[in-house]
């Protein structure tokens, strides 16, 4: 029978499991994100660098292509931590750009017309709401960060002899852990920006500002006051420091692993606090 | 013993340092009976705080609140699975279409995906938004958004629906439609409904019991059905002619009369007294009846009395020992 003829019937059948309910939010957010052409275009653009890296790996593993060249050239073509760190640096910039485009539309539409009361009057907690919204962004950012990174490493492992994979397992672990940390930070910044700034353009600018302006300020603080605590507000340098430590590469000058981790932890805590303060079902005037 | 819809046990709720609810206790409604409970009180009485506490938005500072047998704080998820909530404020997600909005809300409340879509369409037709279901909510008028908010509250078929000021800002036709939908919810679908409203007429029209709050305290809890049964016995009468013997005859028939002025009476009829007998008595005494009204505004009087603006209802005055009988006023 046609719906309009049937009339309303109260549903009394079995309910979906809790996790299945939560997946509704990321699915819906993902549908919206994938419908935005600019996000799709940037996603495609961010595949260029991994493709170039794949070409690089192919060339590095086919000595017949450059057999006549001297030994320094073979050092330059080594697939090591320096290669992976360069890959990560470029892709992290793309991930920030994607987050600046996609992040602002995640929470602000729900906040704009007091829609949060509708979400939180359902069996979903604030933490679950944030994690569900974050999942859509994490999925998107994963496509340009650790997923292509793993593909590159698998490609290299397949082309090189077995000893390479054994000797360089730390690159894989460092890449995945380092990017997970990075993706979590970027997603938190994008969500906090979406929660506090109503206008999407400005919210996107805040995301870019957090990473690029704040990093510049950190460098300036260190240079002007001749101190090192400016690193605490430099997310790019802190993340890079952690990546170096995870991959066994040399740490940047003047930065310790403890400072880098403290900086990321501080930023994560402040961003979580910002979200906690903002995401409430009702405004309470005390 | 039937399970109440809402059970409050010395409920105290504080926001910051300010205590808003000061120890409310009571049992409201009967689970599964399809009754509507009206929540009344002036601004700042604590109605919204009580509703939000039932929804788990606020944590009780002491005491407890249970909904459908579950503690609102400790079993929040189980409570919210059984509730539909229509907030007072204009809450919606502007960029979603009506169908998308209801589908998401239904799924979050536990409807399986394919059922959620079906129910979204069904509910939108039910509330009169069938033709607008593919439009984004941002393009809806205020009344349509109000209906969309009602739709999201019932899309998953909850046992209890909490409606905060459901008729606010509606034109008369939409208001009638809203009240009819509330009536259908309880009568046709067996849902329990809590209606929080400033409009006594709306509450009186759809509710079976009423809770009145003032300054964070419960000051009255009345069963409106029982009050309505009482009302049918209360009559205001205005006659022309000498009514002394008529009043005496009424008293002899077991009625209680209070004369407000010559020819104007307030009468409490005995339970088995038929209205036709009143007309006959008036005719027998040669009186012409100028006005005969059965009382209808009891809720207003209950409310005024609870607020301290009225010492007693006229019905109580008529049956009171101290009230002078016929001719005394």
Image (cartoon, coloured by chain):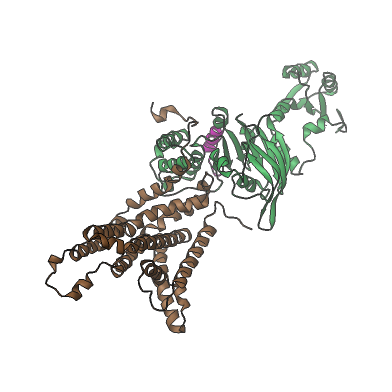
Q: Quadrant of residue B316?
A: top right
* Quadrant occupied by the C terminus of chain A: bottom right
Q: Quadrant of residue B308?
A: top right
Instruction: Please state which of residues B317 and A191 is positioned toward the viewer in this rendering.
Output: A191
Instruction: Please state which of residues A9 and A69 is positioned toward the viewer in this rendering.
Output: A69
- B305 left or right of B114? right
Tell me, yes or no, whether the highlighted magenta stretch contains residue B119: no
Chain B drawn colour:
green
Instruction: Please state which of residues B150 and B111 is positioned toward the viewer in this rendering.
Output: B111
A15 over A245 or under it: above or below? above
Q: Which chain is brown?
A: A
* Quadrant occupied by the N terminus of chain A: top left
Q: Quadrant of residue B78?
A: top right
B101 over A86 or under it: above or below? above
Q: Which residues are magenta?
A: B168-182
Observer able to see residue A32: yes
State the residue lying farthest toward the front: A163
Q: Which secondary structure is most common in the magenta stretch?
A: helix
- A159 left or right of B130? left
Observer able to see residue A46: no
Residue B307 horizontal/vertical position (percent)? 74, 44
Residue at horizontal 54 percent and vertical 59 percent from the top: A277
Residue A232 horizontal/vertical position (percent)? 47, 73
Tell me, yes or no, whether the highlighted magenta stretch contains residue B173: yes
């Amino acid at each position: 029978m046609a719906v309009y003829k049937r009339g309303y019937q109260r549903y009394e059948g079995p309910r979906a499991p809790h996790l299945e309910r939560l997946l509704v939010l990321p699915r819906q957010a993902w549908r919206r994100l994938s419908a935005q052409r600019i996000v799709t275009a940037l996603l495609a653009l961010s595949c260029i660098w991994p493709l170039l890296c794949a070409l690089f790996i192919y060339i590095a593993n086919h000595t017949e292509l450059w057999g006549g060249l001297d030994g320094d050239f073979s050092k330059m073509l080594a697939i090591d931590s320096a290669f992976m760190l360069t890959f990560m640096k470029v892709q992290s910039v793309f991930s920030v750009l994607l987050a600046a485009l996609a992040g602002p539309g995640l929470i602000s539409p729900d906040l704009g017309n007091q829609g949060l009361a509708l979400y939180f009057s359902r069996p979903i907690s604030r933490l679950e709401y944030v994690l569900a919204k974050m999942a859509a962004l994490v999925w998107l950012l994963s496509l340009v960060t650790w997923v292509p990174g793993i593909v590159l490493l698998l490609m290299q492992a397949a082309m090189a002899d077995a000893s390479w994979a054994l000797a360089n397992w730390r690159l894989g672990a460092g890449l995945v852990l380092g990017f997970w940390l990075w993706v979590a930070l970027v997603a938190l910044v994008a969500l906090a920006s979406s929660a506090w700034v109503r206008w999407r353009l400005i919210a996107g600018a805040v995301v870019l500002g957090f990473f690029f302006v704040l990093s510049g300020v950190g460098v300036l603080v260190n240079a002007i006051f001749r101190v090192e605590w400016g690193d605490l507000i430099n997310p790019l340098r802190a993340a890079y420091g952690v990546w170096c430590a995870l991959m066994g590469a040399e740490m940047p000058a003047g930065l310790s692993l403890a400072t880098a981790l403290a900086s990321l932890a501080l930023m994560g805590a402040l961003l979580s606090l910002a979200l906690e303060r903002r995401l409430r079902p009702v405004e309470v005037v005390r | 013993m039937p399970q109440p819809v809402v059970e409050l046990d010395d409920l105290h709720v504080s926001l910051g340092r300010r205590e808003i609810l000061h120890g409310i206790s009571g049992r409201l409604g009967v689970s599964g009976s399809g009754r509507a409970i009206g929540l009344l009180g002036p601004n700042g009485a604590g109605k919204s705080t009580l509703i939000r506490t039932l929804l788990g938005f606020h944590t009780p500072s002491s005491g407890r609140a249970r909904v459908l047998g579950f503690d609102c704080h400790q079993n929040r998820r189980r409570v919210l699975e059984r509730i539909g909530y229509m907030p007072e404020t204009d809450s919606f997600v502007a960029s979603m279409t009506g169908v998308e909005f209801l589908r998401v809300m239904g799924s979050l409340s536990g409807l399986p995906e394919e059922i959620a879509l079906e129910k979204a369409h069904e509910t939108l037709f039910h509330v009169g938004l069938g033709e607008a279901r593919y439009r984004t909510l941002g393009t809806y008028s205020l009344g349509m958004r109000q209906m969309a908010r009602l739709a999201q509250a019932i899309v998953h078929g909850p046992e209890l629906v909490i409606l905060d000021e459901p008729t606010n800002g509606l034109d008369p036709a939409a208001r009638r439609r809203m009240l009819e939908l509330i009536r259908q919810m309880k009568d046709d679908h067996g849902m329990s409904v809590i209606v929080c409203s400033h409009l006594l007429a709306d509450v009186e029209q759809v509710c079976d019991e009423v809770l009145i709050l003032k300054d964070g305290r419960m000051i009255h809890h009345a069963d409106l059905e029982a009050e309505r049964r009482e009302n049918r016995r209360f009559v205001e009468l205005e006659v022309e002619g000498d009514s002394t013997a008529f009043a005496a005859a009424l008293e002899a028939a077991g009625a209680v009369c209070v004369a407000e002025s010559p020819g104007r009476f307030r009468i409490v009829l005995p339970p088995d007294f038929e209205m036709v007998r009143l007309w006959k008595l008036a005719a027998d005494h040669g009186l012409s009846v100028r006005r005969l009204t059965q009382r209808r505004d009891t809720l207003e009087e209950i409310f005024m009395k609870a607020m301290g603006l009225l010492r007693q209802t006229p019905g109580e005055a008529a049956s009171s020992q101290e009230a002078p009988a016929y001719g005394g006023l």
